[in-house]
Image (cartoon, coloured by chain):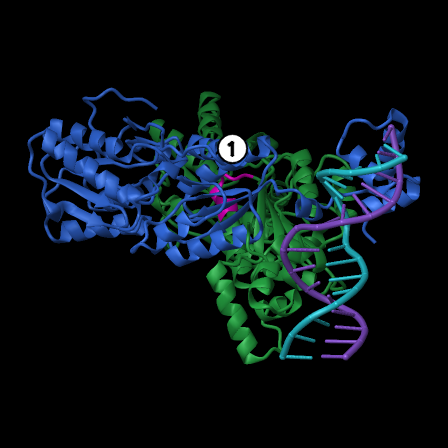
Chain colours: A blue, B green, C purple, D cyan
Amino acid sequence: MRTTLKTIATATGFSINTVSRVLRNDTRISASTTRIIQSKAEELGYIPDAIASSMRNPRTRTIGVVSADFSNPFFSEIIRGIEERAQEIGYQMLVGNSEENEEKERHLVRLFLSRKVDGFIVMPVFGKDSKHLEFYSSIPVPFIFAGRYIDGLKSHSVLHGDEDGEESVFDYLLKKGHRNILYLSGPDGISNTQDRDSGRQKAYDNNDVRSDQKYVFHLTGHPEDGYQAINTAINKSMEFSAVVCFNDIIAMGVLKSLAENDLSVPNDVEVIGYDNLMFSQFMEPALTTVDVPKHRLGYVAMDILEKHINDPEMKYETNHLSSRLLFRDSTGSDKAKQR
Amino acid sequence: MRTTLKTIATATGFSINTVSRVLRNDTRISASTTRIIQSKAEELGYIPDAIASSMRNPRTRTIGVVSADFSNPFFSEIIRGIEERAQEIGYQMLVGNSEENEEKERHLVRLFLSRKVDGFIVMPVFGKDSKHLEFYSSIPVPFIFAGRYIDGLKSHSVLHGDEDGEESVFDYLLKKGHRNILYLSGPDGISNTQDRDSGRQKAYDNNDVRSDQKYVFHLTGHPEDGYQAINTAINKSMEFSAVVCFNDIIAMGVLKSLAENDLSVPNDVEVIGYDNLMFSQFMEPALTTVDVPKHRLGYVAMDILEKHINDPEMKYETNHLSSRLLFRDSTGSDKAKQR
DNA sequence: GTGAAAGCGCTAACAG
DNA sequence: CTGTTAGCGCTTTCAC
């Protein structure tokens, strides 16, 4: 039999209530009683039943987290940030992997609600129709979107300046004179792709250069994608002097293909990634990329979520973190470099 | 007010019990009643309260997972495997990050127990004293160790042949004639380090070569470690013709340092990693490494855990998956290569 | 400073 | 086929 408050109460002769109070450090209990009960609890190896406790408590001190892709280190870093803050403030995390699937995402959120989470954090897909928006509009607990947003609910998001980030990338390349820039963009259906695409467009506009859609490829975001895309471009004899990648993972495949095709980076082709994964500094050559504060993003998301949990009336406001272009060795040497 | 069974019961005129039965697809309920109740539940947006349900149910259909390091893709892959199997069989996952800290690990397990998980999976640290062993010996629910073990509880583990894996690495190198092999080993306090160290020793013994401890460095497992270690070795004018790394992450830093020191891989130095991370095939040169079935490891761990949950009497037996040396471009060309 | 009683939402046992 | 009752372990009144 598991040790419960009742066990301790019987063993010590106090009421269940008194035991409960002691174990929750409630005031107005005599020192001696406290001592007796605490030592008995210790002796019996009492483990509080959080489930039973949350029957009466409105709070479970649990949150849900939906990752879009467990095998992508970008999301892992965000989750690490969430977990760090959660642990600090005494929350536990239920997690699930949506695999970029809209239905699965909603399913996971429903399961979370069923577990009575106090709130949740999602890295959401965009949603093809209004279903997604409707779904989130009817959610009874606080929630935050991390690193992405959903049209109509942007205020729930913590973002990292996708548009500005990609604009700075293209601005750098265009100012340097590049005109044939291969753009290996991200998957449709997520806000980042959309925002970075428009950041790119802005850079072209600001530099009075016409952008050509035939240089844009939408990939899913795996290294093989980048590898294939470059092979294809080369086979089709496309001219390009720079490659901009939706993320560092794609860039990895790109570097691979370029090396195999004897194209030197950055001399023949400049390559820029996005995300600044831990690995990127160890690629050959070290990858120039947009440094996104992944860990911080998760940390902040959890921090904000808690504020909403504690004050359900609080207004939602989009939170913008900033990213910056980080020069390494995959871009030309006429720029200052940093590690 | 949240919709409960009672709400639906009142609205339809049936008893709470009947409503409960319908919503759990219990038999012996008339088709018409079922229809009425189901549509009412739908209409009111009923969300079952899993917390309340598990007050009476012995099962919560929740498991806990303690990762040793959230930012290491090796563990992420294992977790992805766990999650995949968990989702298939309708379990939810509570996760936490121990950061290789023994105390934190136990703390997380205690929290899990408090949440009444049906079982849990841990990537455990080794434990400096008997405390860890004692702790796990008194746990009232089934649990599995993934990818590592704890002395005295090895039967709870799903492993991937660390000893054999490292032995095959050193066997390859020694047979090829290497005598000065730098071994960048892993952190003390985990079983993998211990087992791989003895796999190395076995290879030396089998090849009648004396191993020299001065070639062994114990690192924590980050890329900077590998980078530093090689720099140090070179500065100390150590002679070496091969580097064996505890994991691919260390190997990344090693390749970086070697490139900077104008040492060609594999011509001047052969380099071998461990784990076969997704990234490793995209390194320059593509990394020869030991391919560990990470995803499968997690999947199997969850699968076995469920069996123990369903049959608490079942005997624990160490489960061994196998790894294999995967040749790529960071080792000599006189061996068959594969991608 | 402590105890008794009620009840959170649900499921199981027992009736009918 | 459906309803009544009890109770899971805990916290929250409300007493004394």
Q: Residue at x 7, y 34 (%)?
A: A209
Secondary structure of residue under mark 1: loop
Q: Is residue B57 above or below residue A334?
A: below
Quick check: B162 left or right of A131?
A: right
In magenta, the rendered stretch is B69-76
Relative to B64, is C6 on the left or the right?
right
Please state the horizontal and vertical placement of residue A302, each as a whole percent of the image. 49, 35
Identify the image quadrant of residue A39.
top right
Give neighbour class at mark 1: few <14, some 14-19, many 20+ (Cα, 10 Å).
few
Query: In the displayed structure, does residue B286 sit left or right of residue A13?
Result: left
Near-viewer residue (B253 or A174) = A174
Chain to which the residue tagged by mark 1 belongs: A
Residue in front for this viewpoint, A228 or B280: A228
Q: Would residue B54 be counted in the magenta stretch? A: no
Q: Which residue is mark 1?
A: A311
Report x, y in % for residue A19: 83, 38
* Whole-percent x, y for residue B331 in the image: 40, 45
Q: Residue at x 18, y 37 (%)?
A: A200
Residue sitting at 57 percent across and 54 percent down? Answer: B92
In this figure, what is the number of numbered marks? 1
Can residue A264 be seen from the camera position used here?
Answer: no
Residue type highlighted by circle 1: Asp
* Residue under the point 42% across and 42% down: A75
| Rendered image quadrant of residue A35 | top right
Task: For the C terminus of chain B, give its image quadrant.
Answer: bottom left
